[in-house]
Image (spheres, helix red, strand yellow):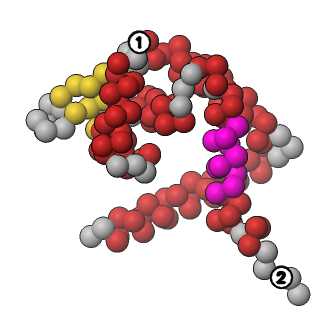
Amino acid sequence: MSHYKPEQSLGFVLNDVARLMRRNFNRRVLDLDLTQAQWQALAHISRNQGMKQSQLADILEVQPISVGRLIDRMETSGWIERRPDPTDRRAINLYLTEKAEPILTKMQKHGTALRMQALNGIPEEEREIMLRALLTMRKNLIGEEGQNNE
């Protein structure tokens, strides 16, 4: 008879791996002088140029005012710029500047090294199965959130 071990539950392990990956990545990017919030914002904006500040706040799970301060600092550093949304005069869209490109390149190199370390010893076929399963889980949970918002 098997005994339930909370430390081996899916939620615990997923959360622990994500936490360890963030911590490891933070150590790797120390030389870039980025806070975790800054590198996460840069990564999300790079994937979705023109995203709204409110969208970034949702993704980072922080209050819009906190994102506003973060964006202020990043704009002062010359990494991002705010532009008015052409379809909503109240909204501001976020874009990376050319100054952010070398930082993103270094972040991507650190990210690749981290993934290689994390996936060490896992055969390619198992990696693909794991990724497909996680993508399906994400899709299922996003669908659930959409149903609850109606």
> Which quadrant would the N terminus be assigned to in this image?
bottom right
* Residue occupying the point 27% across, 70% down: 150
Q: Nearer the viewer, residue 112 or 61?
A: 61
Nearest to N terminus: mark 1 or mark 2: 2
* Residue occupying the point 35% across, 64% down: 146
Q: Position of residue 29 (x, y in %)?
A: 63, 26
100 horizontally vs 110: left or right? left
Mark 1 to mark 2 CA distance (whole Å):
54 Å
Residue 53 shown in magenta:
no
Instruction: Name the dominant secondary structure of the magenta segment.
Output: helix
Q: Nearer the viewer, residue 131 or 29?
A: 29
Q: Position of residue 4 (x, y in %)?
A: 78, 79
The amino acid on which the numbered mark 2 sits, given as a three-letter code, is His
The residue carrying mark 1 is 98
Query: Which residue range is magenta in the image?
Result: 15-24
Q: Is residue 91 above or below residue 109?
A: below
The residue carrying mark 2 is 3
* Residue occupying the point 86% across, 43% down: 121
